[in-house]
Image (cartoon, rainbow, N blue to C red):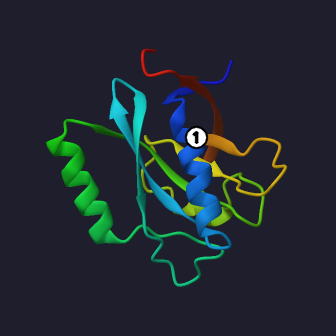
Amino acid sequence: MLPSIRIRREIPDALLQHARANAPNESCGLLVGRNSEITNFYPTKNASPTPTTNYEIPPQDLFRTMRQLRNANLDLLAIYHSHPASDNVPSSTDIARAYYPETPYIIVSPRAGAPNPIRAFQIRNNTVTELSIQTISNGH
């Protein structure tokens, strides 16, 4: 059985909407919550000079969001980005830039008919492990 992440039921729809709204560019953001349960999505800008094939969360967005998380007593539980033109598996760039090895990475495919449009991965020491996604309602 795959290790899993727990995510509120409305978050995957928000991720898909964000990814579709930003296509053909990659979209990105932070997923936060408490007690290992993702409850909130903080979309960010993509500051990459090649936004169609790469993502980069601007430092000011990252710092502002991390400050908001601390003030709200929330934890960073996942980092999200989309692959609008390719499969939603970690690219070599994603693996090389996995700067938060303890934090899962969620990759969204906004393409119509994608067989599994939202996938989660743990990326540690250049090793990729897929995680299962458990959706939960607000009342658990």
- What residue do we see at 66% from left, 54% from top? 90
Q: Where, by quadrant of the figure, is residue 119 drawn?
A: top right
Q: Residue at x 68, y 73 (%)?
A: 24
- The picture places residue 36, in percent across and down from the top left corner, at 40, 26
Provide residue 124's location: percent of width, then percent of height.
Answer: 53, 45
Residue position marked by numbered label 1 in the rendering: 12
- In this view, the residue in front, 14 or 133, is 14
Q: Is residue 103 left or right of residue 90?
A: left
| In the foreground, 95 or 41 | 41
**Measured along the vertical axis of the image, is residue 61 above or below residue 68?**
below
Q: Is residue 132 above or below residue 68?
A: above
Image quadrant of residue 18?
bottom right
Most extreme residue toward the left, as rendered? Answer: 71
Q: Residue at x 50, y 56 (%)?
A: 98
Residue 73 drawn at (x, y percent): 19, 35
Q: Residue furthest bottom?
A: 49
* Residue at position x 65%, y 76% in the image: 52
Q: Is residue 86 above or below residue 12?
A: below
Instruction: Locate the N terminus by quadrant.
Output: top right
